[in-house]
Image (cartoon, grey):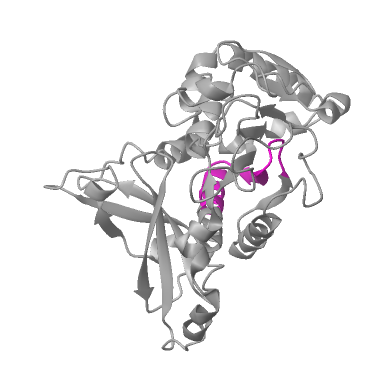
Amino acid sequence: MLEDSPNAQLNKTILNRYLSLELPDGQIIATYIWIDGTGEGLRCKDRTLNFIPKSPKELPVWNYDGSSTYQALGENSDVYLHPVAIYRDPFRRGNHILVMCETYKYDGTPLATNHRMACNEVAQKVASEEPWFGIEQEYTLLDINGHPLGWPKNGFPAPQGPYYCGVGADKVIARDIVDAHYRACLYSGVKICGTNAEVMPAQWEFQVGPCVGVSVGDDLWIARYILHRVAEEFGVIATLDPKPMPGDWNGAGAHTNVSTKKMRQDGGINVIKAAIDKLSKNHQAHIKAYDPRGGKDNERRLTGLHETSSINDFNAGVANRGCSIRIPRGVNDDGKGYFEDRRPSSNCDPYTVVERMLRTILLDEY
């Protein structure tokens, strides 16, 4: 319950006394952000800079204790942070920044959870194809005790039906958090393009894109960071669990929309169908890449029910949300555009999803 959440009990107005303090000229705060050893958790820490960087290359390489993030042993614990993307800080505002980082070992090799480097290498190889990505990030808001926010203490809410894109206090929970997150992402520079209430009560979605290549991963991870930070201030948990409630409730995915230059041109529907044929021959490799536990999380979600396909089978269709790959009705009518891969889980690493997709449909690597 919210009254049990320490963060919800803090008087937030007191903080304004300190946020209004003037800082020395030329000094800003940079929040370095990285992915921890779980492959889905985010960590961060701050440092003072005496300049305003114009690009990530100007920022210093930093380090942290990897033995406390499931990424190193105590006797050799330093992990290095290499800045790769800069965003405006919606919490501190002004010239303060958020910095997305890659993680590297002492010998210069990437950590096992640093999938961005490989993703970027593949994206550079196929840059002439101008691959666009848009990711639909579903998530669920939980009370501090892990129960879905706003659900009855004992029992369940009314069955699914009225909640998707709903309006009204009996259908929508915590729109305040969603709106705060939306505005904060726009301020930061994340290419967030929309949001809506989802099928299960207390479940929401936001969309990032269209972005070119690896940048969709940068934007989505920063959007996730901002979501967790906003929810933290409200004393609420935002979970990316693909199936937060067992039973007759929808799970959560990260549906990934994909388009190349040829798909967007006249006759692109044939290029889309050719890509789907390639995906059909590489189903298991994609399932393995689409959640941090190699498909184990998606086993709970991809059941063939609740607007999903079966994890064991590949299928595609027009306007069919029970398929692995959906061709939107408008795309089919126009004969060009994009397709939607509905298999990635809500807690996927977007860098891995993008890399696997590009390898299959553009480099023919099965």
* Above or below, 216 relative to 155: below
Q: Is residue 328 left or right of residue 58?
A: right
Quarter of the view holding residue 148: top right
Examine the image and state in which quarter residue 315 appears.
Answer: top right
Q: Which residues are magenta?
A: 197-224
**Between 72 and 126, the one nearer to me in the picture:** 72
Q: Is residue 19 above or below residue 70?
A: below
Q: Is residue 72 visible?
A: yes
Tally the numbered discs.
0
Q: Residue 220 location in percent, x, y?
A: 56, 47
Residue 215 appears anywhere in the view: no
Q: Residue furthest left?
A: 75
Point out residue 221 in the picture as x, y percentages from the top left corner. Answer: 51, 48
Foreground residue among 241 and 347: 241
Drawn side of residue 164 relative to residue 26, left or right: right
Residue 252 located within the stretch drawn in magenta: no
Q: Position of residue 305 (x, y in %)?
A: 67, 19
Residue 24 picture quarter: bottom left
Above/below status of 177 relative to 246: below
Q: Residue at x 69, y 29 (%)?
A: 340
- Percent coordinates x, y for residue 241 in the rendering: 52, 36
- The residue under the point 64% across, 33% down is 255
Q: Nearer the viewer, residue 91 or 272?
A: 91
Residue furthest toward the front? 154
In the rendered view, tell whether residue 256 sits above or below residue 335.
Answer: below
- Residue shown at the point (64%, 48%) measured from the top left: 150
Whether the magenta-drawn stretch holds residue 213 is answered as: yes
Q: Residue at x 84, y 25 (%)?
A: 335
